[in-house]
Image: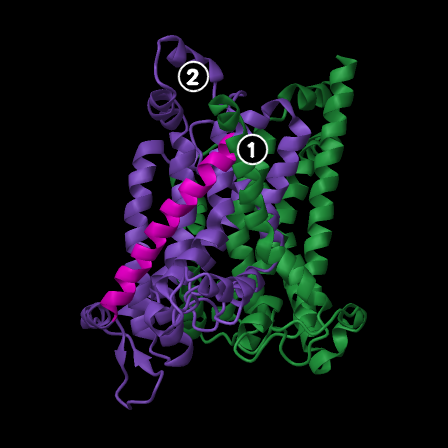
Amino acid sequence: MKFSLGKWLLPLYTVLALIFLMVPIVYTFVFSFNDSLKSNITWRGFTFDKWLNVCQVQNGAVCEAFGNSILIGVVATVAATTLGTMIAIALVRYRFRFRSQTSLLLFLPMATPEVVLGAGLAAQFLSVGVPKDMFTIILAHTMFCISFVVVTVKARVASLDPALEEAGRDLYGSATQVFARITFPLLLPGILAAALLSFALSFDDFIITNFNSGAVTTFPKYIYVSAARGIPAEANVIASAVFIFALAIVVTTQVSRAARAKRLAKQG
Amino acid sequence: MAFAAFSAGTTAPEAAPRRKSPIALLLLLPGILYLVLFFLAPLVSLLLTSFQAPSGFGDVGQYGYAFRWENYVEVIAAYWPHIMRSFGYALIATILALVFSYPLAYFIGVKARNWPLLQSLLLVLVIAPFFISFLLRTLAWKQLLSDESFVITSLKALSLLAPDAHFTGTPFAVIFGLTYNFIPFMTLPLYTTLERLDLRFLEAGSDLYAHPFDVFRKITIPLSMPGIVAGTLLTFIPAAGDYINASRDFLGGPDTQMIGNVIEANFLVLQNYPAAAALSIILMSVILVIVSVYVKRAGTEELL
C-alpha cells in the first residue's frame, strides 16, 4: 500500500500543480463571456456579445491598444531578430577580441530588473530631450529582445554541421549563395523561434513600456490604467484570443516536431 | 530557449575552429552599438541622474547635474522598509517557487521521459501562463481571492479564516502573486537539467544501500544544481524589481509597496528623477553582486 501511494504521489502532485497554474487562465477565459456592464468582476450571465463586438467598448480603446501592441511587437521583433541573429552567427563562427566583454554586454540586459531598464532609458530620453511616443517604446523593446534572440539563435548556429556549407563551397557556390541556400534555411527554425519569443516578450511587456510610452497606450498599459476602475470584458476577449492563438502555434510546432522525430526514427 | 542562458555548463562543446575575419566585426557592430546606445548609455544616464540636484528655480521635475551623493542617504532613509521588503518578498517567493517547481520539473524531466509527447504537452502547460497577459492573470487572482470571493467566504464559513481577515492587500497576497507569476521561470531551467539527469547515478546510490532520501539529497540535488541556480536567479531578479503584484490596484496594499513601486511613483508621478535613479542604482547593484557571484561560478562564456 505504501509503495503504490508513493508511486502515485508525484503524478497526482503534477496534475494538481498544473491545475493551479491554469486557474487564472480559465478565469480570464470564462469572464470573457460575462454579460458585464462597466467592470467585469461579478458574473452576470453568459453572452457571446463581447467576442462579437470587441472594438465597440470605450470607442475602441481596447482595440487601439491592442493594435499598438501588435505594431510595436512586429517592428521590435524584426529589428531585434536581425541584430541578434547577426551577433549569434559572429559569436559561434568567428574569433575576435573583447569576446568575454561582448558576452557580458549581451547577458547583462537579461539580468537587469525591468524597472531599472525602463527608468534608465527614460532618464536618457529625458536628458537628451526625446519626447516619449511609439518610437521610444520600439527602441526599448528592441533593446531587451536582442539578448534573448542571441541566446536562441546561437544554439541553432552551434548545432549546424559545417560540412554542409563546405559541400556548398566545394560545388563552387559563392559566399552569398552558400549563405542564402544553405546557412539561412538551416538557421530558419532557430530564427523563427527567436522571433516568436521576441514578439511574446514585447507584447506582454508592461514595466519598461510604462516608463517610455508617454501618452501611447499598449494592451498591458491599458489594463494597468483601467485596473482601478474595472476592466471591460473585451480585454479578456483579446487576452483569451491571443492565448488560444499562441497555444495553437506552440502545439502545432511540438506535434510536427514529434512527427518528424518519429519519421526519422522509422527511417533509422 | 533563453532559459538555457542560465543553466550553464550543459552546452555542447563547440566544434569547428573559429576563424578571424572582418566579417565578424560587420556582424557584431550594429547590435553591439545598439546595446551600447540603449542599454549601457541609459545606465550611465541613470547613474548621473542619481546625483542630480534640484535646479535653482525650484520647479518640480527640474534638475541639474551635480554630485549630490546625499540623494542616496535620503532615499535609503526614506525607503529602507521598501528596499528590505523587496528583497524579502523576492527571496520568499523564490524559495516557494523552488519548492513548488522541483517535484513538477522532476516528474516532467525524469518520470515522463519515456513518453515524449506527454512530456512536451506538460511543458506547454507549464509555460501556458506566459501566453495570457501578466496583468490579467494577476487581476484574476485578485478577484478570485477578494473578500467577497467564493474562496475567501468559504474559508471564513469553515472558520479556517477569521471573519474580519483579508487576503488581498496583505504581504501574503503579494508573495503569492510573485510566486505564481514566476513559477515557469523556475520550472523550465530545473526541467532542463533534470531532463539530462543520468539515472544510473541514482541506481548506484540505492545499490549501495542509501536511503531514498539520502540519494535525493546527495545525488539528485547536487546534479541538478545548475538548474537550481538558474531558476533562482530567473525568479529572484524579476521578483525583486516587480511592482505589479505589490501595486494597490493588483494584489498589494499601502503596506506592501516594493522598491519598484517607489521607483515608478518617484519617476512617473512625483517627477523626483534623482530619487528614482538612486533607488534603481541600489537595486541594480544588489542584483549585480548576486549575478557576479554566479558569473564567478560559471564564467562569462557560458552565460549565453
Q: Observer-nearest residue: A63 or B248? A: B248
Residue situated furthest top in the rendering = B207
Q: Which chain is purple?
A: B
Q: Which residues are magenta?
A: B79-106
* Image-based side of B72 in relation to A146, left or right: left
Q: Which residue is mark 1?
A: A11
Assess disc 1: are there few (<14), some (14-19) or many (≥20) residues with their C-alpha within 10 Å of its C-alpha: some
Q: Is residue A249 left or right of residue B144?
A: right
Residue occupied by mark 2: B202
- In this picture, is B242 found above or below B216? below
Asked if residue B85 lies in the magenta stretch, the reply is: yes
Q: Residue at the spot x=38%, y=66% of the render?
A: B162
The residue at 51%/54% (across/down) is A144
Tell which residue pokes out farthest to the front in this image: B158
Q: Is residue A104 visible?
A: no
What scheme was used to colour the molecule? by chain
Let me know if residue B234 is in the magenta part: no
Most common secondary structure along the magenta stretch = helix
Q: Callout 2: residue from which chain?
A: B
* Residue B89 image point, x, y percent: 34, 56
Residue B254, given in percent of the width and then of the height, sits at 35, 74
2 and 1 marks on the same chain: no
Q: Chain of mark 1?
A: A
Q: Determine the residue positioned at 59% across, 38% down.
A: A153
Q: Secondary structure at mark 2?
A: helix
Estimate the x, y position of residue B33 in percent, counting from the top left.
48, 52
Q: Dot 1 lies on which element?
A: helix
Q: Quadrant of residue A189?
A: top right
- Dividing the image into 4 quarters, which one contains the C terminus of chain A? top right
Q: CA distance from mark 2 to mark 1?
A: 20 Å
**Which mark is in front, 2 or 1?**
1
